[in-house]
Image: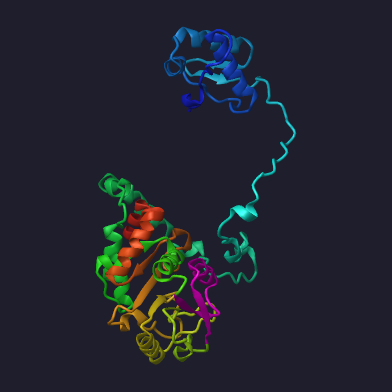
Amino acid sequence: MALPVETFFLRPDAQGTLQQQIQQMIAQGILSGRFQRGEKLPSTRRLAAHLGVSRITVTIAYTELLANDYLTSRGRSGYFVSDNAPAPPAFAPRAEAEDAIDWTRAIGQRFSANGLAAKPQDWASYRYPFIYGQADPTLFDHANWRLCALQALGQRDFTSMTTDYYDQDDPQLIEFIARHILPRRGVSAQPEQILITLGAQNALWLTAQVLLTQRRRAVLEDPCYPALSGILSQSRCHITPVRVDQDGLPPEAIPPDTDVIFATPSHQCPTNATMPMDRRRALLSRARALEALIVEDDYEFEMSFLKPASPALKSLDDEGRVIYVGSFSKSLFPGLRLGYLVGSEPFIREARALRASVLRHPPGHIQRTAAYFL
């Protein structure tokens, strides 16, 4: 494959004839290391058309470079950078320039302090790799995922893949969530009540941005999913941690001025506690008395080993008080970065508008591939 013709251009202030300018341009590319030995140059016809010069001008320039061993020619194949071309000189590493900006003053908000804990890249080689959120790639049906990706790339789905959904999502993925995934959790929802997100963490961020202000109070579990406290800090709301017990978040400990409650009833992170049904009903009753909303992060509900998973808290809600957060990180794989929000239509409308202002929508091809695979 030839070097892209777009990388060649004549400088307006260059000296010498056109032939000399072309020779110098190619020689400088070789000496700077941009053109590597053995790489093919554009044909004389293409380069001439690109530069707006005659073909004979480019041919003569190539011939001169051939004579000086910068280039070599191969019959019916074209011109290539010669193996004997001068090697780029070795320069000492350039000293890094120091910024003239005082970043301690320029940065208006700081997020690095709330970053996720680092995971070692070679975590799988540890004897006891106690790292949450990672999947065993040997258990994943890679062959079928590949077939689904190819199907999503087909001509029939080309429009779905390339169209700008603007603020919408792939209808097939939405339909699967509504018809197959949510009913497993006892939840019924219409398409306009579902929003695809870039994972559960993105769903939590959207929720916090829509529901919380500097005057509102959020309750979160103590301990909790580490990234959640950072997300709530960004909203600048009042944060009240409530200590969990063996059954999860105790409703009676929630303060009376609470606006939004963040909870993980199915699989509390990091204690793994599952909230009993009686406490789930008590939590709903407490939220109703406070006129508060509940954000249910249905974290790892699939990981039920001792008994079947309990219905989601959202399934007990008949007032639209619970906003449900789901993810494909465990059922498929974490690197997919797909999740979903389920809530009343007015809330989803605002979350959709916020998502559209930041990233429009998760990639259509990824959504369609996941829909086929599921």
Q: Residue 227: percent from the left, percent from the top?
A: 53, 69
- Tell me, yes or no, if residue 314 can be seen here: yes
Q: Is residue 221 located in the magenta-colored stretch of the structure? A: yes
Looking at the image, is 39 positioned above or below residue 367?
above
Looking at the image, is 5 positioned above or below residue 54?
below
> Which residue is painted at 56% across and 13% down in the image?
21
The stretch of residues the image draws in magenta is 216-244
Q: Residue 179: percent from the left, percent from the top?
A: 26, 69
Going by the image, does 246 lie left or right of 96? left
Query: 285 and 158: which one is in front?
Result: 285
Which quadrant holds the C terminus? bottom left
Q: Quadrant of residue 23?
A: top right
Looking at the image, is 237 positioned above or below residue 172?
below
> Which residue is painted at 45% across and 66% down in the image?
205
Q: Residue 109: percent from the left, percent from the top?
A: 55, 60
- Tell me, yes or no, if residue 147 can be seen here: no
Q: Is residue 229 located in the magenta-colored stretch of the structure? A: yes
Task: Looking at this view, name the residue that lies furthest to the right.
Answer: 92
Q: Residue 210: percent from the left, percent from the top?
A: 39, 67
